[in-house]
Amino acid sequence: MGQYEIHAFVCTQGPWCPRDGDAEGVHKRLKKLAGEHGQKSRIRINHSGCLNQCGHGPMMAVYPENVWYAHLTPEAAEEIFHQHFMNGVPVERHVYANKPGANKVPRDEEGNLLEDICCKEEPR
């Protein structure tokens, strides 16, 4: 295993994740929680450039588990921190699964998504 048990990469510098939601807020919330819970030596939270999944953001990739999360908010990040990072259970409703490679959603000239890809919870 590497230097950290969990290494999370939050797309905050790509062309769309910062525009599609509060990517910086997701990063800040995770960093704050790692500090508050004394986990900075175990959990590393990094800024990331584009993860090549534009239109699904804000996004985060978590290693070594290779779990990806999409459509994140700071509130979702807090849930992921407690359930996944602290207890080892990925938050399934935020997990991003797609075919390998770039999976960018097309946009019009103004940057609006041309497909409805927002993952909404199904009624239970």
Image (cartoon, helix red, strand yellow):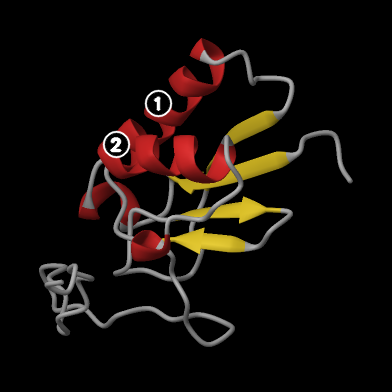
Query: In the image, is 69 to the left or to the right of 6?
Result: left
Between circles 2 and 1, the one closer to the viewer is: 2
How far separated are the C-alphas under marks 2 and 1?
A: 8 Å
Q: Residues within 10 Å of mark 1 (few under 14, many from 20)?
A: some
Considering the numbered disc 1 on the image, is that residue within a helix, a strand or a loop?
helix
Quadrant of residue 115 in the image?
Answer: bottom left
Query: In the image, is 99 to the left or to the right of 59?
Result: right
Q: Disc 1 marks which amino acid?
A: Lys
Q: Which residue is mark 2?
A: 74
| Residue 9 position within the rendered picture, expressed as x and y whole percent measured from the top left | 56, 46
Query: Which is more toward the observer, 22 or 5?
Result: 5
Q: Residue at x 50, y 80 (%)?
A: 102
Which residue is at the far right?
1
Question: Mark 2 or 1 closer to N-term?
Answer: 1
Q: Residue at x 58, y 40 (%)?
A: 87
Query: In the image, is 80 to the left or to the right of 111?
Result: right
Q: Residues within 10 Å of mark 2 (few under 14, many from 20)?
A: some
Q: Which residue is mark 1?
A: 28
The answer to the question of whether label 2 and label 1 lie on touching residues, with beta carbons closer than 8 A, is: yes
Q: Disc 2 marks which amino acid?
A: Pro
Image quadrant containing the C terminus: bottom left
| Residue 29 position within the rendered picture, expressed as x and y whole percent measured from the top left | 38, 27
Count the marks: how many?
2
Compared to residue 22, the image places residue 39 above or below, namely above
Considering the numbered disc 2 on the image, is that residue within a helix, a strand or a loop?
helix
Quadrant of residue 73 in the image?
Answer: top left
Which residue is at the far front?
124
| Residue 14 position within the rendered picture, expressed as x and y whole percent measured from the top left | 42, 53
Query: Which is more toward the observer, 23 or 86?
Result: 86
Q: Residue at x 72, y 27 (%)?
A: 42
